[in-house]
Amino acid sequence: MRKFIYIGLLKLKLLTKDKISLASIILTPIIFVTILAIGFGNYSSNKDIKYPVGIVNRDTGKYSKLLINMMKNDRYFDVTEGSYSKSREDVENGKLSMSFIIPKDFSSSIKSGKTTDIDVIKLQDNENTSSFGIIVKNYVQQLSTGINAEKASSSLLTSMKLINESKKTEIENSIEKDYLKNIKIPKNTYSINTLQKNESHAKDQLSTTAIGIIIMFITFFVSLGAGSILEEKDFGTWARTESTPTRNSTIMLGYIFGNFIIGWLQVGILILFSKYVFNLNWGNSPLGIVILFSSFLLAAIGLGTALSAFVKSKKQLSTLMPIIVIPTSLIAGCMWPRDIMSDTMLKVSNFVPQTWIIKGTTDLITRSSSISAVYTPSLILLIFAAVFFILGLGTLKVAK
């Protein structure tokens, strides 16, 4: 059984002699991560980012204006007032994170102490939009609290006969004026804490987006590298190897082992370079990452082996690989969040291996899950690998 290790190490030894191929394997992931980090760089470099939100004000009273002023004075909001149609268009085009609709009876509801709801325009629910809604609701509660306080104060003073009924309205107006003057500039820290949390969440989202693209990169290059068997056939070395007493299964294990080590060389460079140079978040479970990516590498190598069985040359494989890898990576959610995908697409995506490493890394990174979160995805990836290897090796035997 040690023969397959020797065959794999021989493949690595031959690689070290090919300086161009070795440099390509080392530099390609570094260049790729650098370009990726530059492309997403503005997300992580701006700590004082303002979030663009819209306001559609259908109310003519003073309380809606006070609410708008409070939002404009919030250090995290970049407020744009406009019509409903304009706000909806800007949200759909991505110019606004979301838009708030202040109802026409807002001021009267606040004044009378009634509950008032503010509708929103948003494309999807996420932590940012939820936090913005809570912050605005908190501001509305501050306004309501002031009104309730003024009424309670004036009623108490009246009941204690410290003021007469004719002075009640005057006292209420005075209390209201002082209170509203005090809250024009938000002093609560809830929004700051929440948005700091969301800033961290945004970095996690950046990490998952970048990792999705990295996964597509790994799938392409590792699967393509697994097609080295085609080069061996072209050069005649595969036939000479098969003529030796070594069993074909041992030879294939050797090639798989060699490609696995080369794959981990690239993955290791990608992970370490992106983490320590560009501070990309890879979660808190290094062992989970190792298990998950080892399983995925086997699936990617298996995919390359299976595809190699259906083509006659490395050139044909290079042409076929993008046709297979890019669509399946898109279906898996490598280029966008899976939570915006339809239920049908999510079900279809379960039949491509990239989906399961996306699920595993998402659990490790954005949910800070333990190593147990990678067990199921890793097992399914190993099943993919087994199916691909059986398909590829079976077809190669038939072709022989």
Image (tube, rainbow, N blue to C red):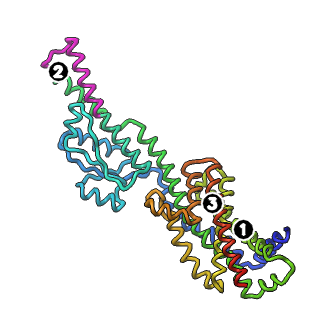
Q: Which residue is mark 2?
A: 168
Q: Nearer the viewer, mark 1 or mark 3?
A: 3
Q: Is residue 107 above or below residue 239?
A: above
Exactly how many numbered labels are in the figure?
3
Residue 205 seen by the camera: yes
N-terminal-most mark, 1 or 2: 2
x 25%, y 29%: residue: 147
Nearer the viewer's eye, disc 1 or disc 2? 1
Query: Whole-percent x and y of residue 75?
Result: 38, 45
Let me know if residue 147 is in the magenta part.
yes
The verdict on residue 371 being magenta is no
Which residue lies at the image location 71% right of the left edge and 76% below the top edge? Answer: 393
**Is residue 298 or residue 164 the one in the foreground?**
298
What type is the residue that disc 2 sits on? Lys
Give the residue number, with chain letter if any, for mark 1.
260
Tag 3: amino acid: Ile
Range covered by the magenta-colored residues: 143-167
Q: Tell whether 44 sits left or right of 65.
A: right
Residue 45 placement, left or right of 125: right
In the rendered image, which quarter is residue 235 located in? bottom right
Amino acid residing under circle 1:
Phe
First along the sequence among labels 3 and 2: 2
Callout 3 secondary element: helix
Counting from the top left corner in percent of width and height, residue 72 is at: 31, 46
Q: Which numbered dot is residue 380? A: 3
> Closer to the camera: disc 3 or disc 2?
3
Element type where label 2 sits in the image? helix
Locate the C terminus by quadrant. bottom right
Disc 1 from disc 3: Cα separation: 18 Å
Please report whichever mark, 1 or 3, sits nearer to the chain's N-terminal start.
1
Residue drawn 63% across the image and 60% down it: 380
